[in-house]
Amino acid sequence: MQQLEQNLKTALGAAFQNVFGTEVPAAQLVLQPTRKDFAGSFTLVTFPFTKSLGKGPEQIGQAVGEWLVANEPAVKGFNVVKGFLNLEIADAQWLAVFEQLRQLPADAPVATGGPQNVVVEYSSPNTNKPLHLGHLRNNFLGYSVAEILKATGATVTKANLVNDRGIHICKSMLAYQQYGHGETPQSAGIKGDHLAGKYYVLFEKHYREQIKQLEAEGVATDVAKRKAPMMLEAQDMLLKWEANDEEVVGLWKQMNGWVYEGFDETYKNIGVDFDKFYYESQTYLLGKERVEEGLQKGVFFKKEDGSVWVDLQAEGLDEKLLLRADGTSVYITQDLGTAELKYQDFHYDLSVYVIADEQNYHMQVLKAVLAKLGKPYADAIYHLSYGMVDLPSGKMKSREGTVVDADELVREVVEAAKQATLEKGKIEGLSEEEAAQLFHMLGLGALKYYLLKVDPKKRMLFNPEESVSLEGHTGPFIQYSHARISSILRKAAEQGVGVDASLTSLSELHDTEREMIQELGRYAAVVAEAARAQSPALVAQYAYDVAKAYNRFYTEVPIFIEPDAAKKAFRVALSAQTARAIKNSMGLLGIQVPERM
RNA sequence: GGUUGUGUAGCUCAAUUGGAUAGAGCAUCUGACUACGAAUCAGAAGGUUUAAGGUUCGACUCCUUACACGACCA
């Protein structure tokens, strides 16, 4: 379709040349799809030309339109409404567009001239508690952005930076030491990440009790928080960990092992994957080296207490701590090391960090610090900042126990999909295993689509009832359209209707057929824009538009009843092409589509 | 206090990046399964795009100010 648009632009240029005798810069010839309520397929806005031509917008549209109809075979007709020139395209052109789409391999990359070598870091969990709803948005976004970039022909590495060290990890370790009695995931029958989370919560509970007690003894709150015995013990544990204390490191390895097993299960269950894992325990030392490098280069400075800082006021930021007085690292120290390591490993020209928007400032600092160090990859860093997920009851707070657990949520959406599917009673003949796979596909489709259809940078509201809904603007709506088409294709195969019929004998297209082709033709442009904006929401919207357009076509145009064999074959081919577009675009979102449901 | 993001129908979200009468879904109401899958389709109703100015042929979009909510930095 790009070619059709290009041809139209060339013709428009010629029209201006011939009618008004002036050259119009190609950049000014912007075509947009015509709004549904007007006749035509492409629209040129003529207002911008009124000044230079000294003529009214209608007059220009009329003249250009007439010239096009007389001289450009692709333009069948036109109408002018105020400053809008609507072009009607000849059906032969649409069929040519369709033919081109059909010839394209299903996995043909969409060339964009964008970055070729990309690392997308996402998920990046803490190893002290299980994944929750917020992580799901992160995981689905990261996976989808990676897939979209792959679709533009880029080489993409999916990376996961595991936050496996620090005081928060020690908290769950300490609580386990004190209250665990040697419990294991096996003995407790609890997933490893949930077991660690249980002890993290236990730590918080006892810690808070200790604070209360100290306060009752007249200690000020902030002092109580620092001096509570459990906090002191956790800090002591962190020091021991950094000193490679055998017992502490042993416990750390054991508990992290449990957590990784739990994460693996969850990742598998939600259908995301990674090519490379990084662990902060392995990058923080490299980060310290970078801090040292900065000191030597004179871009960082040391305060009297020995802590290391960077002055970013020239960049519109503040002074920022890079290394504590006691020499222990802070978040940014580790991030410096990880960025360096990632670059050594992959020499990316784009490094995407999928991180919540509460880290906006932190990521600005990271970029600025790397720039100060003169790192060539500083510019390649891009923070894909996404908004928090709120609940109808308000904000999610792990400390207040108002988080929505990822595993539990997935179970619920799959169960809801199962109930709805069984009610419809349309899946007879599927084995038990196939049915289970289908329920999983539909439940996850609903959940993923729900989280991905919203613009990433916006904060969003998670409504549990809507998230399991299967009707309207949802994943299952699109999945249903695919299942429906699959059914048609099965029937076509039975009846021996080929999809490779010649299109040349077709006379006139139905409106919905024309719209369908135009919709299918947008695919490449949508993927390119989604990659540029790093927004799966655009792909989600597109998949919905395609399904919607098909359903309209489906109710208005007969397929198997059609007596004209050429038309019948074309409609089957159009259906097959639509199924492909749905499967592709949903695939970019990490959502699978069924043959029946 | 400083920086920054958001504000669109009762609710959840769009709006091709400055273009036409601001579109979808949910909820409400009406109609369509003896032609191919009704998880569908067709239609009704629902809007002073937070407010006030400004730029423009044209503003949800850009600028200024104010208000509300959030995040971050102290």
Image (cartoon, coloured by chain):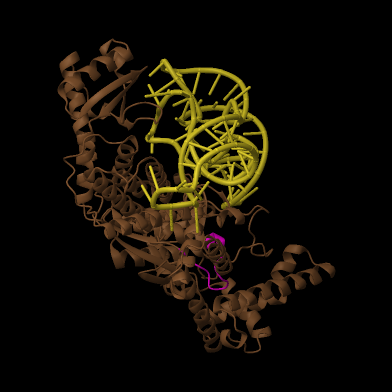
Residue at x 47% of width, y 55% of height: A476
Q: Do we see residue A182 in this rendering?
A: yes
Q: Is residue A356 above or below residue A524?
A: below
Is residue A358 depicted above or below A558 in this figure? Answer: below
A37 horizontally vs B32: left or right: left
Out of A23 and A36, give the one closest to the viewer: A36
The magenta span reads A123-135
Return the x and y of residue A228 as percentages of the image width and height.
72, 73
- Which quadrant, please, contains the C terminus of chain A? bottom left
Q: Residue at x 28, y 26 (%)?
A: A87
Residue A39 image-quadrant placement: top left
According to the colouring, which chain is yellow? B
Image quarter hosting the N terminus of chain A: top left
**Left or right position of A212 against A70:** right
* Letter of the chain in brown: A
Residue A597 inside the magenta-drawn segment: no
The reply, left or right, for residue A502 in relation to residue A78 is: left
Magenta residues, dominant SS class = loop
User: Looking at this view, is A5 or A305 the one in front?
Assistant: A5
- Residue A339 coordinates in the image, percent (x, y): 38, 63
Q: At 42% across and 44% down in the image, what residue appears?
A: A548
